Image: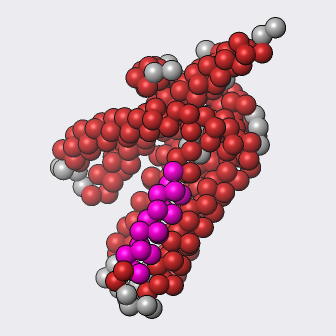
Amino acid sequence: MGIMEAIKKGFGVAAKNMSLILVLFVFNLIWNLASIPLARQGAAAAGAAGAAPQLTAAAAILSVVFILASIFVQGGALACVRDYVKEGKAKLANFASNGLKYFVRLLGLGLLIILIIAIVGLIAALIIAATAGFNNTAVTIIATVVAIIIGVAGLYYIILLILSPYTMICEDIGVIEAMKRSVAIVKRTIGKVLLLLVLLVLISLGIGFLVGFLTGLLTMALPANVAQIVIGIINSAFNGYLGLVMMASFMVFYLGMAGQEKVSAQKVFKV
């Protein structure tokens, strides 16, 4: 599976699934509009001694709700993309049931990845902290190098897990098995995976810069309150569309790699 082919098909999937983009747009818009009052209150409280406890609690609750809702939406969207790529039909009617079906597994996957990041960060911090008392430049340099190596190793492992949501939903497997399968595939194709990720990020940044520039021109003459709403609408549309493109590109790439694996296995075990 070529990288440019995966990206091209990713844009194609997005272009033919406007209903799914609409779902993602509405979800993003709800979050953006809900966060506007908190942002205004936060700006008003910035000059005070500190943010009001009620404001902090509301922001924390809203963030947790958004994260949990995002996991539900991710499960439903990934399943729709999988169905479209494999069968030519997104099956949007199953969005909610798929979101619920994969919710616990995607949540578990996210928590495990956060745990890995936390452990790596803690180990690196402990190494630096443990050697700080020596007041020795050589020891400090060695400790810093070791901490950086640990950080790079942790980043490498996180990259190996990048296909875990796709393996989980395409193969309907558990968290640990999805992680193992992602590691096995990405290890063999890490150059392609990194190139795909970098190109998609660059495309998003390029389009995002253009959209942001045009949005800035559009909202210059608008009142601040109206401008915030307009920006929220445009950002929601941008994130919904590009989010689906990235999701579809990785889905196409994974299914292409999985298909090649299957063909190879059939050749090996053919009687």
Residue sitting at x 65%, y 22%: 261
Q: How is the image coloured?
A: secondary structure
* Residue 242 seen in the current view: no
Figure disc tally: 0
The image quadrant of residue 62 is bottom right
Q: Is residue 215 left or right of residue 70?
A: left
Residue 208, percent from left and from top: 31, 41
Q: Nearer the viewer, residue 47 or 184?
A: 184
Residue 126, percent from left and from top: 53, 78
Q: Is residue 63 above or below residue 138?
A: above
Assign the magenta stretch its main secondary structure: helix
* The magenta segment: 139-156
Quarter of the picture containing the C terminus is top right
* Residue 267 seen in the current view: yes
Q: Is residue 66 left or right of residue 137?
A: right
Asked if the magenta segment contains residue 18, the reply would be no
Residue sitting at x 77%, y 10%: 270
